[in-house]
Amino acid sequence: MTGQRYASTRVLPWRNRQRVRLLTERLVVINVEDAARSTKLLAQTTLRNFLGTRTLAEMLSSRDAISMQMQAALDEATDPWGVKVERVEIKDVRLPIQLQRAMAAEAEAARAAGAKIIAAEGEQLASRALADAADVIATSPCAIQLRYLQTLNSISSEKNNTIIFPFPTELIAKFIQSAAA
């Protein structure tokens, strides 16, 4: 994913006291006007900051490590308030529909680019094989005549209405020599 690192997530509710614990109620009352709201906003901001710097693959593969880093950052910020964040979990990562479409378009473009590269490599190999065949034919005058007869044979074996006018290769050689002179 190139440059697109957005995620909206579900933040766990404040009311579940198992996740956040007030260490010293006096500190909470003195340092923070609304501890629940402040902690929730800090958690949302921290979540956006942490997930915004990671790709989707990193988010999905290392949720536990991200959760531990977030908990450490939240603890550091809430300790002066007298609030202890006991547990941080990233349960669900939801991507907006627009971002999903952008990622799908990016993946399709990457697949198309890969297909073009494979096709170009195939054409390159085919052109090298044709150049090698031309070198072989150039060294043997009979080789071009055999190739000519082989082509006539393959055309005549098909059931079609193709009319073939055999043209001697010696005449073609004379035309080429006279054009070069």
Image (cartoon, rainbow, N blue to C red):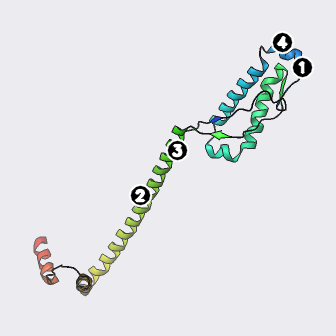
Marks 4,3: beta carbons within 8 A: no
What is the distance, in whole Å, between disc 2 and disc 1 at their CAs? 64 Å
What is the distance, in whole Å, between disc 3 and disc 2 at their CAs? 20 Å
Q: From the viewer's perspective, is the residue at label 3 or at label 2 nearer?
A: 3
Asked if residue 181 shows in the view, the reply is no
Q: Which image quarter holds the N terminus?
A: top right
What is the distance, in whole Å, between disc 1 and disc 3 at their CAs? 46 Å
Q: Which residue is mark 2?
A: 116
Query: Residue shown at 78%/38% (left/top)?
Result: 68
Position in image of residue 179 (x %, y %): 11, 71
Residue type at mark 1?
A: Thr
Closer to the chain start, of discs 1 and 3, is: 1
- Mark 3 Cα-neighbour bin, 10 Å: few <14, some 14–19, many ≥20: some
Closer to the chain start, of discs 4 and 3, is: 4
- Mark 1 Cα-neighbour bin, 10 Å: few <14, some 14–19, many ≥20: some
Query: Residue shown at 48%/54% (left/top)?
Result: 111
- Mark 4 Cα-neighbour bin, 10 Å: few <14, some 14–19, many ≥20: few
Query: Residue shown at 78%/33% (left/top)?
Result: 71
Marks 1,4: beta carbons within 8 A: no
Residue type at mark 4?
A: Ile
Q: Which residue is mark 3?
A: 103
